[in-house]
Amino acid sequence: METLLEVEKLCKYFQVKRTLGEMTKNTPRTVKAVDCVSFRVRRGETLGLVGESGCGKTTTTKLILGLLKPTSGRVIFEGQDIHGNIMQSTLKHVHREIQAVFQDPAGSLDPRMTIGEIVREPLDIHKTGDTSFRDDTVRQMLEAVGLTAEQYNRYPHELSGGQQQRVAVARALTLHPKIVILDEPVSALDMSVRSQILNLLKDLQAKFDLTYLFVAHDLSVVRYMCDDVAVMYLGQIVEYCPTQDLYEHPIHPYTKALLEAVPIPDPSKRITRPSNLRGSMPSPINIPTGCRFHTRCPYAVEKCEKVEPELRELSKGHFASCHLAETPL
Amino acid sequence: MRFYLGAGVVNAVEHLSFNVKRGVNFGIVGESGSGKTVTALTIMGLLARPPGRVDSGTISYDGIDLLKLKNEEMRRIRGKRIAMVYQDPMTSLNPVLRVGFQIAEALIVHERIARHQAEVRAVELMESMGIPEAAKRAKEYPHQFSGGMRQRIMIAMALATNPDLLIADEPTTALDVITQSQILSLLRDLEKKHGMTVVLITHDLGIVAQVCEEALVMYAGHGMECGSIQDIFSKPKHPYTIGLLESTTRADRQIERLMSIPGTIPDLINPPSGCRFQPRCPVAQSRCSKEEPPAFSHGSDCYSKCWQSESA
């Protein structure tokens, strides 16, 4: 399958304000939110981006959506670097092709617009078709996401969380984008509604030939939705491979710890020993030297403190950044 | 349990019965609006009245009906014999008091121990919760701790008076997955180490399976199914429990297509007639919308509130 979206050595550093005291102590002033991240999303597939809060998942999506400028690196969509020298008209076209659905449906819908207006707005902004075309598209989209025509004139607060998320999905799809960035699309939803939205997203992917970048912290949801998965830790990808490989043969100690910590809804599969990871995630202002995971890694050796491991291909299509990848742990 | 609101009366919890046995960790699972937190707050005597009101029923704890107690009497039980850990550790800790003192406070109030002794005990409790450098950290304020550490402080605070019963309301929702697994194993060990019974309230079926021995599944203010963890997960009886289990994503297996429960959670001001799950139930019959099913018992402390269980 051809690559639709490629992220190449993408970095985003933020400058932080320091107090005078901090300046004299020479505390670092940059937060490396995203630090040299590369991945490819193939047409028609779903790439999962997982990690704990603060690992840089959302910053990565903002860079892809063009909401932030990268410090360095490239975001290549259909062969064009969207942050490079690009004509305004091409950029506008690219923005139509990359759409997003966010975590909090209530917070991402304008409370003063009706459902119909919300779903129609992208068409108005991009001046697509005439009035009757826009009306038809909105109706089709509302139907495609499982909303009824009578909800057209409702306001977001009149809908349930699941229905609001359907509206957000419809809005993302009105311009028929090629790729949709799904940033934690179901974590704010109730259990019985979650699977409805996940199945809807799968159905729409098949129907409209969509490509997804699925950002989540919940490993069980990622397993259901994704073809490939990239695991992020402190702004970097530590493991990247096809979904089944990741869940059945994880390599990186961080991935292993994450997978062991997921509570399985089966009393016979209890976690018998608590996670052997030490401490908690360090601040992205003070990234540890060498392997950035070594401060928490139960297997770390001297080399891990000094030398930063590279993301290496250990078996076909399975990348991990760990010095001890070949050593049985 | 009813709420009298401007918009009408909300029957937040109705006809709910369950038993928590000493030493058997009990889970209450439900989605938002299912009444699980209301149930916990009612047990604790912490519901705002008005708008809330308990219209009928009893809460019997060690032979005492908690609903009949005067405020003063309840205050002696709450925090001493029944303690609670709340969902959000940031807003439940006092930001202007040192955490060591906050843990010691329960001892000072309930056990009438001198402050310095209580603070020594607080440090011991923090150590037993796995907080490193406890003596130093007891002098710090809540904002200096991470989410996981704050939750450990909340648990230490609840354990200070050595209660029999600990109610934990979504104790890990704000935490990342690794910290969550550490807190859950801590809760599971409380029974062994301190002889304490935990009532764990959660929306996550995985968490109940990890910590509890018995569980209650709630939906729209009703207890739908109650029984042992093994029965609920391997032989669920109620269509809602079955639907929930089949629509849950799992990290331990590849699922081709998830089932899903159609529709949305009902509005409790105008709840559906008959069984509250009936509008979304795949096996609903005409009777289900007319008559509310009673809790059909199948063994001690096991029930399913579904007409299908009548014949079984």
Image (cartoon, coloured by chain):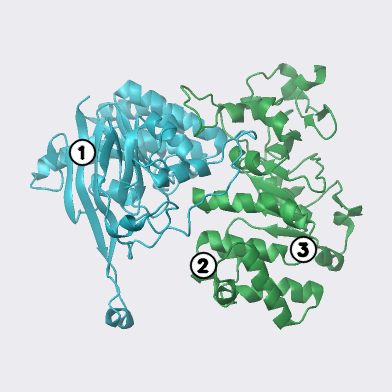
Chain colours: A cyan, B green
Q: Secondary structure at mark 1?
A: strand
Q: Is there any visible trace of residue A121 in the rendered image?
A: yes
> Amino acid type of disc 2?
Phe
**Against A146, is B171 above or below?**
below
Give the residue number, with chain letter if any, for mark 1.
A6
- Left or right: residue A208 versus residue B229 is left
* Residue B175 rendering spot, x and y as whole percentages: 52, 53
Q: At x 46% / y 35%, what residue is drawn?
A: A221
Q: Secondary structure at mark 2?
A: loop
Quadrant where the C terminus of chain A sits is: top left
Among numbered discs 2 and 3, the one appearing first in the sequence: 2
> Amino acid type of disc 1?
Glu
Give the residue number, with chain letter if any, for mark 3.
B162
Q: At x 76% / y 34%, what residue is drawn?
A: B227
Whether labels 1 and 2 share one chain: no
Q: Secondary structure at mark 3?
A: loop
In which quarter of the view is residue B138 placed? bottom right
> Amino acid type of disc 3?
Asn
Q: Residues within 10 Å of mark 3 (few under 14, many from 20)?
A: some
Whether labels 1 and 3 share one chain: no
Whether labels 2 and 3 share one chain: yes
Give the residue number, with chain letter if any, for mark 2.
B145
- Left or right: residue A178 versus residue B294 is left
Q: Is there any visible trace of residue A154 in the rendered image?
A: no
**Against B311, is A115 above or below?**
below
State which chain disc 3 sits on. Answer: B
**Along the line of sight, the residue nearer the viewer: A313 or B43:** A313
Q: Residues within 10 Å of mark 1 (few under 14, many from 20)?
A: many
* Residue A81 rendering spot, x and y as whole percentages: 13, 43
State which chain disc 2 sits on. Answer: B
Distance (Cα) linking label 2 and label 3: 24 Å
State which chain disc 1 sits on. Answer: A
